[in-house]
Image (tube, rainbow, N blue to C red):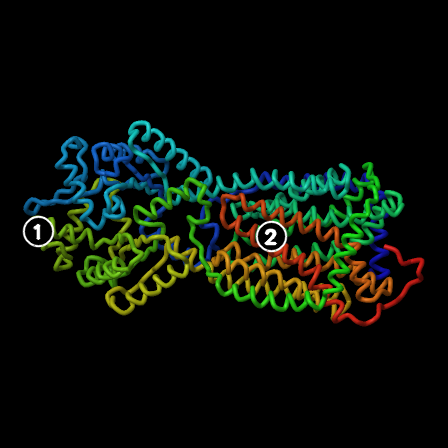
Amino acid sequence: MTPAREQFATRLAERVLAYRWPVILTTLILVAVASSGIALMEFSANYRIFFDEDNPQLLALEELENTYGKNENLAFLIVPDDGDATSESALSAAIWLTESAWQTPYSRRVDSLANFQYTTADGDDLYVRDLVDPQELDRTELRSQVRAIALSDPRIASSILALDGGVSVVNVTVELPEEGLLEAVAEVAEFARSVAAEAEERFPDIDLRIVGTVMVNQTFVEASIDSQMVFLPASLLLMAPVLGVLTRGWAGVVATGMVIVFSILASMGLGAWVGLPFSPPVSPAPTIVLMIVVANCVHLLVALQQGLRAGHSRREAIAESIGLNLHPVFLASLTTALGFLSMNFSEVPPYRHLGNFVAFGIAISFILSVTFLPAVLSLLPVRAPKDRRRRGPTMSRLADFVLSYRKALFWGWLVIVPILALGIPRNELNDVLVHFFDESVEFRQDTDFMDERLSGNTLLEYSLHASVEGGVTDPLFLAEVSKFAGWYREQPPVRHVAVITDTFRQLNKSMHGDDPDAYRIPESQELAAQYLLLYEISLPQGLDLNNQIDSSRSSTRISVSAETLSSKEILELNARAEAWLDKNAPHVTGVNSTGPAALFAYIGQRNIRAMLVGTMVVLLAISGILLFALRSLRLGLVSIVPNLVPAVLGFGVWGMTVGQVGLSLSVVVAMTVGIVVDDTVHFLSKYRRARREYGQGPEEAVRYAFDTAGRALFTTTVVLVAGFLIFVFSPFVPTAQVGVLTAMIIGFALIADLTLLPALLTAVDRGSGDRVPPASSRNT
């Protein structure tokens, strides 16, 4: 360090040790104040948290809901053991579930095979009744008639009843309140599970599965709780023995543990104070903060042990540790915080929140590591470990190997990096909402079952507008709507299309004596309007057509259900649909295309573009900081290489093995670039110290860096890799994927810093050190 920096670090250490009790007391008070914000923290459990309020697809979805009503739902899948959903037992279960489902909190509509409104006519009189008559379930011929009608009606087949007749659905539409959404979701989910359990007791030959957006939101909550039950305990169990082996005593473990707990509490509290909500994507934040704390403390503890081993008193060793590490730990914390803050470029609010929570934790961790930690260590019985001489020879041998084969290592990197980089283009953007949950999660199993047997997990919504009020009954408009639905039904992945023209066709058929040849759109607008009026006044309460036609009768809704599609496939399918409408539907004057699937398909592309900008900004910022801090253009430029290469290798391997990236992985580069810089900063700071303060040549400076920083770099990398790999146990798949890819990149970063960086340094930094101090001052 420069004399000014060294003097500042020394004065700071002396002040902290001189006023250790006030430092500890002040820390306790400030942490208590900061962490009190946790009581104000809000938990977001809606899948819409992934979108900004001004997201165009979200606005389109809200417009559609304002027109036709909200579409939040839960669905009971009735799966009879005998494979016949129209058997007496299965239909009895459908009737009982339909009646019970009306008691669901916040319910406004229930649709099932039991209460499907079937039309017949007698002359000019239209009759609308439930498809299933509870009094005639024992009649085989009537059950066969129900099955035949259901499988031949496009409004039922593959939506309410599976095409093979083996599964039926009771769908409950709910209107959840804006306030208290978390509690409302839990209430509905709990009610649904209790009803399903009772149904399985009443009908032992029936299996019940529950899906729907309400269950998506509730599973988000449960996944977050399950993750926290694993992350923090597992991380603490991992970190304690690592620190114990490193410090060979309980003092370092206890002191670091206090810094961990205080940093996590204060970061969560500060985040809540500024209004950051907690959500499933944010759940890794406490564990990430824990790992950053350990990484900071390890460097200070290693230097402390080296000082004690050299014969210094505890106070002198602590002061020397602060003097040696204040600057690199500050730089590492700053660059890591910038990496996480760059997540604010993301189009996805939860990942912005995650970045800010962790940035708070990093800042708090740095402050506590250079104030509270040394103050506490000065009070604990820290002793010098036995000098077993394991570290020195090991790191010396590694340094000798790297220096002896630096050219071969350099050329090896030059070959490996381009090869693995070829895997990057193989990564395809893909975000499927229900696939956010691991296959071990019951909800994921149920939705996969629905995808295989019924309508599928992809839902696209369209609102088609006629040119005039009341135009929804115009036969020309209805004909184009019907052709659009027909076009969609011809697309291979599409399972079901809900469209109002099927109802008009059925009404026309019924009003013509149920003549099959009359299954067509009414010939005139007046006739269509008359049929619609007769039908609507015959419908029971709660089963109107407001979910398909707007109040002004100028627009209609089409809901397209398809098998699970990738984001790319959804975008292509939607683009073809809009192109078809533009070319073939002149009477459709406006189109609003949206739906949950479209929301996630479009956000991926925008988020990638946004994070590319964020990554470039943080790379430039970190490079500028390193250039300024190292006071060397050569070292600053050299430092960029080992910080970029790990991400290239990580995404290359990911492309060759997995090949799909989603919202969570799009922020990994920006997040990890700040983390991997840490090793580079500590290695270069020790290298620069040897060059400038001790006047050593490049090779000797590299050996000095290995000897003084190598052990800490290896330890922090093990901690970080192991910590991120804990995320693999998360039931929330995006979190698990972030853990695997981040661990991989951090591992590559250590290899690059210990092999590629020394080769680059010895190649480009051939000038002499700035000064050579007297021999007496050359110590570590």
Q: Nearer the viewer, residue 271 or 570?
A: 570
Above/below status of 128 relative to 553: above
- Which amino acid lies under the numbered mark 2 shown in the image of this protein? Ala
Whether residues under marks 1 and 2 lie with C-beta atoms below 8 angstroms apart, the answer is: no
**Badge 2 is on which residue?**
743
* Viewport quadrant of the C terminus: bottom right
In the rendered image, residue 559, in percent from the top left (x then y), is placed at 30, 53
- Which amino acid lies under the numbered mark 1 shown in the image of this protein? Asp
**Badge 1 is on which residue?**
515
Which residue occupies the extreme top position in the image? 202
Q: Nearer the viewer, residue 71 or 732?
A: 732
- Say which residue appears at 77% left-offset and 46% top-offset: 301
Horizontal side of residue 278 vs 638, given as left or right: left
Q: Residues within 10 Å of mark 2 (few under 14, many from 20)?
A: many
Tell us which disc is closer to us: 1 or 2. Answer: 2
In the rendered image, residue 288, in percent from the top left (x then y), is placed at 62, 48
Q: Residue 468 is drawn in which quadrant?
A: bottom left
- Say which residue appears at 34% left-offset and 53% top-offset: 563
Looking at the rendered structure, the secondary structure element under dot 2 is helix
Which residue occupies the extreme left position in the image? 123
**What is the spatial separation of the Cα atoms under label 1 and label 2, in whole angstroms?**
67 Å
Horizontal side of residue 33 vs 418, given as left or right: right
Q: Which mark is residue 288?
A: none
Q: Nearer the viewer, residue 328 or 37?
A: 328
| First-in-chain label (1 vs 2) | 1
Looking at the rendered structure, the secondary structure element under dot 1 is loop
Above/below status of 640 relative to 247: below
